[in-house]
Image: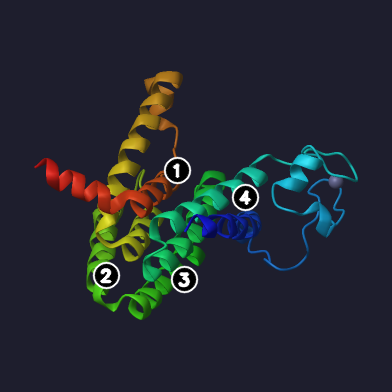
Amino acid sequence: MPAALLPAAAFGLVIGSFLNVVAARLPGRMSLAMPASHCMSCDTPIKPYDNIPVLSWLILRGRCRSCSASISPRYPFVEAGTAALFAGVVAVHHADTAALVMGLVLVAFLVPIALIDLDHRIIPNRLTLPAAVIAVVLGTALDPGGQVERLIAGAAAGLVLGLPALLRPTGMGMGDAKLIAVIGLFLGLAVIPAFFVAFVAGTVVGIGVIMRKGMMVGRKTPIPFGPFLALGAVVGLLAGHELIQLYLAAF
Ligand SMILES: [Zn+2]
């Protein structure tokens, strides 16, 4: 298994590079393929040798080769983060093909969803809808025995966030409800610790914002919940079943 971690990380670097493109272009309905990557400042197309994940950014010290405009450190971070997540999924799920494949696919959806929610405060249907379809198709093909659990988990999780959003359309949006439903379709019961982690992390950050900005401003500062759901999903993906066992053992 350790031998598989390196190729998993390398694969994650390449996918992460593509997910940066998805996060940048999908909200504006731009093509993911055309045009090729170019500098945001001077429009110069980026040469293949300047487009190597993480490495090129380090070699160029975060600047465009043509115009020296700075390139956001978010790009190499997303690439390195995707690589780490892919290696993590392989480390945890290498013995279970269904969990392995579905875990990698889930990560590939969570990364751009979290980034787009951070940037634009939306969770696009153009990501959650295909993610839901792929979860059901992969789950049915690779692990039919667990499909009922995942369908129930997805529906229940979607309702828990979706009903309040429908009744009182403030704060939590329908995008969040669709995202947690997708997470349930991928993770089954592990959606429970995923939701718990998201809720706790979101609450801690929310309190932090209120403490920094004061009650009046802080309460009105919108905080996108998608990144917290993505964080929770990663915890559920890598440690969900252990967390459920721990919980059950404690009571
Ligand atoms: Zn440039």
Q: Could you tell me how far apart the alpha carbons at marks 1 and 2 are, in whole angstroms?
A: 26 Å
| Residue 240 percent coordinates (x, y) | 30, 51
Which callout, 1 or 2, points at the residue further toward the start of the chain? 2
**Which mark is first along the chain, 4 or 3?**
4
Is the residue under label 4 in contact with that under label 3 (CB below 8 Å)? Answer: no
Identity of the residue furthest to the bottom in this view: 141
Sequence-first disc among 2 and 3: 3
Instruction: Please name the residue shown 57% across and 45% down the image.
Output: 119
Q: Which residue is mark 4?
A: 79
Label 1 belongs to which residue? 224
Q: Which three-letter amino acid code belongs to the residue tagged 3?
A: Pro
Q: Are marks 1 and 2 in contact (CB under 8 Å)?
A: no
The kind of residue tagged 1 is Pro
Q: Which residue is mark 2?
A: 151
Tell me the amino acid under the disc marked 2.
Answer: Leu
x and y, in percent, of residue 134 in the image: 43, 73
Q: Is residue 140 above or below residue 170?
A: below
Instruction: Out of 220 and 190, give the one closest to the viewer.
Output: 190
Distance (Cα) linking label 1 and label 4: 22 Å
Q: Residues within 10 Å of mark 3 (few under 14, many from 20)?
A: few
Q: Of 183 and 100, which appears nearest the observer?
A: 100
**Mark 4, secondary structure of its residue:** helix
